[in-house]
Image (cartoon, rainbow, N blue to C red):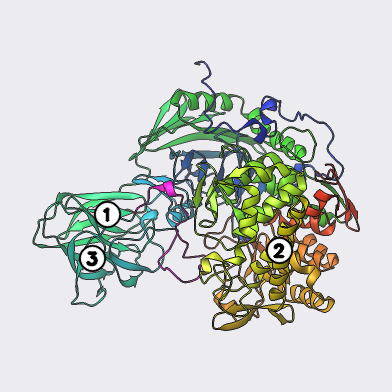
């Protein structure tokens, strides 16, 4: 065996002060912490792992994470999709397990922070698998356990498919991040999801080339696709639309239309029937800037999209027609006069150019066994199997499988703890086969490892070395996670730059919710992707392996500042240097803005900065420069936004948040213009700025800011509609809405302005209309707009991850911690065997689970708001600006238990 290669390259070298001393303990053995005593009340990590869940009860399957990457399990027993260890992105999936030639479906699944188990029974044979990500490695470890419960010997043929379609990519790490395909690198949500759903098929097929649903047939220049984005104005339908949330370096540009004429558009169905598309006699002129929608059309396997095309000059290049506006859309184009077809990550082209001046019949016939391109009735090209070796090549060498990417430096290697009886490679795919004979009652284990990197020899050595000590390496992953969890509550532990309060609760359910929220922060913390140091990723893993949203970060700003103050300080400076008035998040790998603007940004960033300063006492941050101005001046700019955004309607005091639903709640179509929520937020920001300016010796400006805040607060209170609801101010008049965001921000920012009767009405509204079973609904289901807002995060079908925590905090501010505690006690029951997702949907039986429909995230860091609600709500530890002047709020003891280790000013840190 050759000498060990150099350690895997890290994309950035984080500053020492941002890593909380982690470099000093990089070689600490697993399980050995720098400190020894875990505070009372902190459960062992094993207690927070999920229970075995029937597959049928899960809408959204579990995920896999480590401190560098993320991935998603599929419905078979071993394959993974949506893998990313930035800068390595994985495409397609990693391969299925076959038992006696068949692919068993996972019947039961169990999540833990260090891995996911899947199990199925085949008569008396039980097959159980577990997959883990190596701790701070671009590595995966699988263990397959087979048990014969019968009284007879049981022969078993085990075949493990081995795929590693990874690319090294330094760009395109937005919320919609690029993944590798045979014909390129782009985000293609539904093509990947179709491949995930196909893993249980007896044999692989090209299902990624089959389109999803009804789409527009477009002529000419196609729009830059997002997930599924055909419209410009309608509220987001989570199943079908999302703008292009890619980073600016994705390289996606709008292709021109091809100068040509088109006629005879039609669809030919699999049964031979045909129908014209658009006006039957129409002929269309296509030019570079043409963007013409003809009609909507659904295509199924065996259907053909046909048209006639004429070019009047040789060498024409550009797009002729597209079925939809999606990454996987069938797109007919011309390249130097040759007809080309792009679909589902594949691209094929005719060998000969079209003759100029003549009409040519062109067709695209779709199928799960491949898509055909025809010219003049003859097939001129067809897509090839995605696993067939077009881009990636698998080879067997020294008992391992090596996979090379022809389009990037990525190299991968599989190695085996138990050498297979047969190991073969063909194209991009390898197969390991074991022939076993299990005695009655016998259990056998098979282990294998995948390593990803840039060096062929490096990944081979790393995989082989790990496989050679597989049991130790496999268990070490869990031990490192357990150690990390303990250190999250231990001053001086070294893994984090701070620590979290430990809760000894009077109620076990409340404690479980509190600690699961803390675990979510630890689970979504990534130590590799950002040059600034550790960051809390927003969610995923089908999205955003490097992305942080300003809004989501603010939902647990106090908690984050306690756990990772050095990382948060660096993140704040990076966030304020981004154009936050034009984006909703940023890619922490390349420090680039992502997506459209959110109306929440000012409040979110202001809240995050002030929470950090108030928790840590770090006033020096206010003088630091970010994006050409000091942090304090950023706070001024955000708090003073109402001066330039006054509504031209109503009383002229409220801030006009605009008419773009994508900037507000996306799926609630009337939630725009002068909404109460962020107006209350601006009032609170002005008052907080005044308190800060007083502290900094600027009394005149403080008085002006306070006066403006009071004026805005009065305008907000004037929007009260009775019964706990609030009015939205529109240019054409007001209308009433019953959304939890209004409740949460009014209660958080203006509780002291509310008379007792109004407080009681707001509590009654929240408890009676929003809180529901183990979770809640974001929008009152009786609200008139509810039927138009069927989305399980912001609509009436459920609620976003942050809303229970934010609502519970609001209930505490309104004097009802008992109601808040009831909500928090129940919240852990909605985790679907893991942690909370972006959207929690109500089921027919009234229970809640993590939603998958559309593009929801399996984990969402905003749910750490439940932990924040315990600290700031039930214990009143507000960590406000007043604490810097010695007015410390809250106590470590309350009716709900006791907190220890509160790393905040006035508690573990000295008051100002």
Would you name the residue on which mark 1 appears?
341
What separation in Å lies between label 2 and label 1 (alpha carbons)? 63 Å
Residue 229 colored in magenta in the image = yes
Res. 704 mark = 2
The reply to whether discs 3 and 1 touch (Cβ–Cβ < 8 Å) is no
Above or below: residue 528 compared with residue 350: above
Q: Residue furthest left?
A: 357
Q: Residues within 10 Å of mark 1 (few under 14, many from 20)?
A: many
* Residue at left offset 52%, top offset 56%: 583
Above or below: residue 512 compared with residue 783: above
Tell me if 360 is positioned left or right of 792 in this view. Answer: left
Q: Which residues are magenta?
A: 227-253
Residue 706, quarter of picture: bottom right
Res. 306 mark = 3
Residue 219 seen from this side: yes
Of residue 762 and residue 346, the one placed in the foreground of this image is 762
Badge 2 marks a residue whose secondary structure is helix
Q: Earlier in the sequence, mark 3 or mark 1?
A: 3
Label 2 or label 3, whichever lies nearer to me, is 2
Of residue 679 and residue 35, the one placed in the foreground of this image is 679
Tell me if 766 is positioned left or right of 99 in this view. Answer: right
């Amino acid at each position: 065996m050759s000498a060990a290669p150099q350690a895997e390259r890290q994309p950035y070298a984080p500053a020492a002060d941002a890593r909380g001393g982690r470099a000093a303990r990089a070689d600490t053995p697993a399980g050995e912490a720098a400190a020894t005593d875990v505070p009372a009340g902190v459960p062992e990590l094993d207690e927070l792992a999920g229970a075995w869940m029937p597959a049928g009860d899960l809408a959204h399957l579990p995920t896999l994470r480590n401190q560098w990457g993320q991935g998603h399990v599929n419905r078979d027993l071993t394959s993974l999709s949506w893998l990313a260890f930035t800068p390595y992105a994985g495409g397609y999936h990693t391969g299925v397990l076959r038992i006696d030639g068949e692919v068993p479906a996972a019947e039961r699944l169990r999540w833990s922070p260090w891995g996911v188990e899947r199990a199925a029974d085949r008569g008396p044979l039980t097959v159980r698998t577990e997959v883990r990500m190596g701790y701070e490695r671009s590595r995966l470890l699988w263990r397959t356990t087979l048990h014969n419960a019968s009284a007879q010997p049981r022969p078993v043929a085990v075949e493990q498919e081995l795929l590693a379609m990874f690319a090294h990519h330094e760009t395109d790490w937005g919320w919609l991040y690029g993944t590798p395909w045979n014909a390129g690198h782009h985000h293609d949500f539904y093509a990947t999801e179709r491949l995930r759903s196909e893993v249980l098929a007896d044999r692989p097929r090209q299902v990624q080339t089959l389109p999803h649903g009804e789409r527009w047939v477009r002529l000419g220049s196609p729009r830059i696709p997002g997930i599924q984005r055909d419209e410009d104005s309608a509220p987001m339908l989570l199943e079908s639309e999302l703008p292009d949330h890619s980073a600016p370096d994705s390289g996606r540009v709008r292709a021109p239309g091809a100068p040509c004429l088109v006629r005879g558009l039609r669809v030919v169905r699999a049964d031979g029937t045909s129908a014209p598309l658009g006006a039957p006699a129409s002929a269309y002129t296509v030019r570079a800037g043409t963007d013409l929608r003809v009609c909507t059309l659904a295509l199924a396997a065996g259907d053909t999209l046909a048209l006639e095309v004429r070019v009047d000059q040789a060498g024409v290049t550009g797009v002729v027609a597209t079925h939809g506006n999606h990454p996987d859309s069938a797109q007919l184009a011309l390249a130097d006069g040759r007809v080309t077809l792009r679909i589902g990550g594949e691209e094929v082209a005719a060998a000969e150019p079209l003759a100029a001046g003549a009409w040519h019949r062109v067709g695209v016939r779709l199928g799960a066994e491949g898509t055909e391109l025809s010219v003049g009735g003859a097939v001129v090209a067809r897509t090839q199997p995605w696993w067939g070796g077009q881009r990636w090549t698998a080879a067997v060498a020294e008992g391992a499988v090596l996979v090379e990417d022809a389009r990037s430096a990525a190299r991968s290697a599989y190695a085996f703890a138990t050498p297979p009886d047969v190991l073969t490679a063909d194209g991009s795919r390898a197969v390991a086969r074991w022939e076993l004979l299990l005695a009655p009652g016998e259990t056998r284990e098979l282990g294998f490892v995948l390593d990803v990197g840039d060096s062929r020899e490096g990944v081979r050595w790393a995989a082989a070395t790990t496989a050679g000590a597989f049991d130790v390496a496999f268990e070490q992953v869990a031990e490192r996670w357990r150690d990390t969890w303990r250190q999250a509550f231990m001053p001086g532990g070294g893994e984090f730059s701070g620590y979290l309060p430990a809760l000894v609760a009077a109620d076990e359910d409340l404690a479980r919710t509190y600690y699961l929220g803390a675990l979510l922060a630890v689970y979504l913390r990534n130590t590799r992707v950002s040059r600034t140091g550790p960051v809390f990723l927003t969610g995923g893993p089908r999205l955003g392996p490097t992305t942080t949203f300003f809004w989501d970060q603010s939902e647990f700003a106090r908690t984050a500042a306690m756990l990772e103050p050095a990382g948060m300080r660096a993140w704040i400076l990076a966030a304020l240097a981004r154009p936050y008035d034009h984006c909703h998040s940023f890619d922490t790998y390349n420090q680039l803005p992502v997506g459209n603007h959110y109306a929440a940004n000012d409040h979110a960033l202001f809240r995050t900065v002030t929470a950090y300063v108030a928790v840590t006492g770090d006033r020096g941050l206010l003088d630091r420069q970010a994006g050409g101005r000091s942090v304090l001046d950023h706070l001024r700019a955000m708090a003073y936004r109402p001066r330039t955004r006054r509504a031209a309607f109503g009383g002229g005091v409220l801030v006009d948040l605009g008419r773009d639903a994508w900037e507000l709640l996306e799926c609630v179509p009337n939630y725009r213009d002068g909404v109460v929520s962020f107006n209350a937020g601006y009032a609170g920001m002005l008052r907080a700025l005044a308190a800060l300016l007083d502290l900094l010796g600027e009394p005149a400006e403080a008085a002006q800011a306070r006066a403006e805040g009071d004026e805005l607060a009065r305008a907000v209170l004037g929007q009260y509609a009775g019964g706990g609801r609030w009015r939205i101010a529109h240019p054409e008049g007001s209308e009433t809405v019953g959304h939890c965001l209004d409740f949460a921000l009014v209660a958080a920012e203006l509780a002291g302005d509310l008379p007792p009767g109004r407080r009681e009405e707001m509590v009654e509204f929240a408890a009676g209309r929003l809180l529901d079973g183990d979770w809640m609904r974001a929008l009152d289901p009786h609200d008139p707009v509810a039927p138009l807002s069927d989305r399980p995060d912001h609509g009436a079908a459920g609620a976003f991850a942050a809303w229970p925590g934010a609502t519970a905090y609001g209930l505490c501010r309104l004097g009802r911690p008992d109601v808040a505690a009831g909500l928090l006690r129940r919240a852990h029951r909605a985790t679907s065997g893991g942690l909370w997702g972006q959207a929690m949907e109500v089921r027919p039986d009234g229970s809640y689970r993590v939603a998958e429909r559309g593009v929801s995230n399996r984990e969402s860091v905003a749910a750490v708001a439940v932990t924040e609600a315990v600290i700031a709500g039930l214990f009143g530890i507000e960590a406000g600006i007043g604490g810097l002047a010695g007015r410390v709020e809250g106590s470590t003891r309350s009716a709900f238990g006791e907190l220890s280790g509160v790393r905040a000013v006035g508690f573990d840190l000295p008051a100002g």
